[in-house]
Image (cartoon, rainbow, N blue to C red):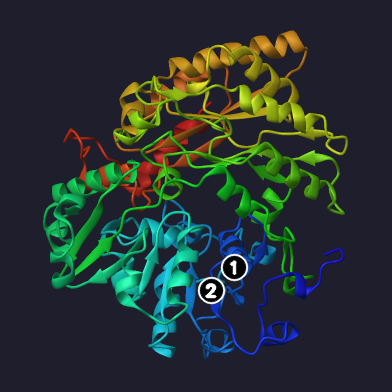
């Protein structure tokens, strides 16, 4: 732990609260993850942002929900609100495989041990808090809450579930990245719970009555089908998703309202994406970049070990892949950090006592979207495309790789950095032609550990179309370029493609085709994943409804677990 003590972290116990001389807390945050004070862990970011505004904040990581609930009681009632997150992953994805088998480990727990968070953690934590402290506001956030804010398909129960607001009884739900909205909530609650003022905050969802909904401006509100209607008619569920995704991809979105019995889920429009200055502020907070000392001698936290020497260059992803939750949560528009912010973080990393000179990743949701944006913002304001690069790269997208190449150059000049790897996958379908050869050459020869990860996802154009991924021919071109660059540099590196089996529209015929094509390209496949439907993705909607909700094209969907295994087995056929 170096020179850090518990006073350098947000307090997690009564003793640590008293060490700070506090008699009362303003906000108490509950998380399904272990507490790692690092900008890649959401609860740390939210806690540090609130702390920077002068609020007294504590964190209760992985509270025990099965005993006498002492973890929920030990710090008492906060002055303003409880904040709840299931963690950096949806708890059901964290717990179960695509075959619905219980996982034996948890990457966000010391020692990788499983069993330290419940299924549907958001619902469980919020209900406990509302039972113990019925008059204290509960604010639900995190990716689980965010992606379950509307009626959604739940793969593990194989049916539709209502908004998590209904089952959790949370007072407010924050969706997306909470940097701005959590500060507005705290500021609004500072002088007491004023429902009228709270409901004006952007990027939140809440339950309201008909009287409130009737007063919403009709030109800025979309009424969705009710939960009950979606349960009766799968196509109505698909229609809801189209509205949700479309509004999520607008710069100026509308309010979405979804009826549930005699109540309404109201989802206010989001904030614009963060500016560089706002993002820099989030990353410049006084993180220790370490797990809390309470975990000393309890084993390493695998998720932290993976990113401890990595640097996130940006947020957001304009890829719009059907199966991915990144754009649904972080947004389509990319927010990039300044060069100085990135270099400052690297300087902090190099001072870590166990840093050996190697950065594991200079990346983001997609490694090469840094500093990319629309050339004409006015055109972006009128756009509702889910992807800026599918089915073709938007002509209004400035996809120059010059800025990221400059970052790479400056990082290489830091004496303490021996090598900076690109651990995130790159989008090879959006590299600008002007910088293509230079970018690929630099990444392959200077920033890989001998293995470059990319994600073609499939070889069948029929399946790729439903995935919103580019034609397989672009991967073939990349493979040719990769081999040429390696031969010229005199290195024997590997290109590592990722693929998905059992995605909607994929049958065993398509998997056989994939196996044969990759065998013809002399690839031995390693990185394979059986498709798991996750809430609020186009792919999960197609899985549940059996059709593309935009076109109503009927799709083959493999739902049988044994047949899904057979599809995945094609990856390993000799």
Question: Can you tell which quarter of the image residue 33 is in?
Answer: bottom right
Of marks 2 and 1, which one's residue comes earlier in the chain? 2
Query: Taking 333 as reference, is 15 above or below it?
Result: below
- Residue linked to disc 2: 30
Residue occupying the far front of the picture: 191
Q: Which residue is drawn at 30% across and 33% down?
A: 383
The percent coordinates of residue 266 (x first, y second) are 25, 63
The percent coordinates of residue 534 (x first, y second) are 38, 51
- Residue linked to disc 1: 53
Taking the image as shown, residue 97 lies to the left or right of residue 194, namely right
Mark 2 or 1: in front is 1
Depth order, front residue of 199/311: 199
Q: Which residue is drawn at 33% across and 55% down?
A: 155
Depth order, front residue of 430/401: 401
CA gap, disc 2 and disc 1: 19 Å
Residue 360 visible in the snapshot: no
Q: Which residue is drawn at 64% across and 19% down?
A: 439
The image quadrant where one finds the N terminus is bottom right
Query: Taking 559 as reference, is 510 above or below it?
Result: above
Q: Which mark is residue 369?
A: none
SS for tag 1? loop
Number of on-image labels: 2
The percent coordinates of residue 241 (x first, y second) are 24, 47
Depth order, front residue of 506/509: 506
SS for tag 2? strand
Residue 20 visible in the snapshot: yes
């Amino acid at each position: 732990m170096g020179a850090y003590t518990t006073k350098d972290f947000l307090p997690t116990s009564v003793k640590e609260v008293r060490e700070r001389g506090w008699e009362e807390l303003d906000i108490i945050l509950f998380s399904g993850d272990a507490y790692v004070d690092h900008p890649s862990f959401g609860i740390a970011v939210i806690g540090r942002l609130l702390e920077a505004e002068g609020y007294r904040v504590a964190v209760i990581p992985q509270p025990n929900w099965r005993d006498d609930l002492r973890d929920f009681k030990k710090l008492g009632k906060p002055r303003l609100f409880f904040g709840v997150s299931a963690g950096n992953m949806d708890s059901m994805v964290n717990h179960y495989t695509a075959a619905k088998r219980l996982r034996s480990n948890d990457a966000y727990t010391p020692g990788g041990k499983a069993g330290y968070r419940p299924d549907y953690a958001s619902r469980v934590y919020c209900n406990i808090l509302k039972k113990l402290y019925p008059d204290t506001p509960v604010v639900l956030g995190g990716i689980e809450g965010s992606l379950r804010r509307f009626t959604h398909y739940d793969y593990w129960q194989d049916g539709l579930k209502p908004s998590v607001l209904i089952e959790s009884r949370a007072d407010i739900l924050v969706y997306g990245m909470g940097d701005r909205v959590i500060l507005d909530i705290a500021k609004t609650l500072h002088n007491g719970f004023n429902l009228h003022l709270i409901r004006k905050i952007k990027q939140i969802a809440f339950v309201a009555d008909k009287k409130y909904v009737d007063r919403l401006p009709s030109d800025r509100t979309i009424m969705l089908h009710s939960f009950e209607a979606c349960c009766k008619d799968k196509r109505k569920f698909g229609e809801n998703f189209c509205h949700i995704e479309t509004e999520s991809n607008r710069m100026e979105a509308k309010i979405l309202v979804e009826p549930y019995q005699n109540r309404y889920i109201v989802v206010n429009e989001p904030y614009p994406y963060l500016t560089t200055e706002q993002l820099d502020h989030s990353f410049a907070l006084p993180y220790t970049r370490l797990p809390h000392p309470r975990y000393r001698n309890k084993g390493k936290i695998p998720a932290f070990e993976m990113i401890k020497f990595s640097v996130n260059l940006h947020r957001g992803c304009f890829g719009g892949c059907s199966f991915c939750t990144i754009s649904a949560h972080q947004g389509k528009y990319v927010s990039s950090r300044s060069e100085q912010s990135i270099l400052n973080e690297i300087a902090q990393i190099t001072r870590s006592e166990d840093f050996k000179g190697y950065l594991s990743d200079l990346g983001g949701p997609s490694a090469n979207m840094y500093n990319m944006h629309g050339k004409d913002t006015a055109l972006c304001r009128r756009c509702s495309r889910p992807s800026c690069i599918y089915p073709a790269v938007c002509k209004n997208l400035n996809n120059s790789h010059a800025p990221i190449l400059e970052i790479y150059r400056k990082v290489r000049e830091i004496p303490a950095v021996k090598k900076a790897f690109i651990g995130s996958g790159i989008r090879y379908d959006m590299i600008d032609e002007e910088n293509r050869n230079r970018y690929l050459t630099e990444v392959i020869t200077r920033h890989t550990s001998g293995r470059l990860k990319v994600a073609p996802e499939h070889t069948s154009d029929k399946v790729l179309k439903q995935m919103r991924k580019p034609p397989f021919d672009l991967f073939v071109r990349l493979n040719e370029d990769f081999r040429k660059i390696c031969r010229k540099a005199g290195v024997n590196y590997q290109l590592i493609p990722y693929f998905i089996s059992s995605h909607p529209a994929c049958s065993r015929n398509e998997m056989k085709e994939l196996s044969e094509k990759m065998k013809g390209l002399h690839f031995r496949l390693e990185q394979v994943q059986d498709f798991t439907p996750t809430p609020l993705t186009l792919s999960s909607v197609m899985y549940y409804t059996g059709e593309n909700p935009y076109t109503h094209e009927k799709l083959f969907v493999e739902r049988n677990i044994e047949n899904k295994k057979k599809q995945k087995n094609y990856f390993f056929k000799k």
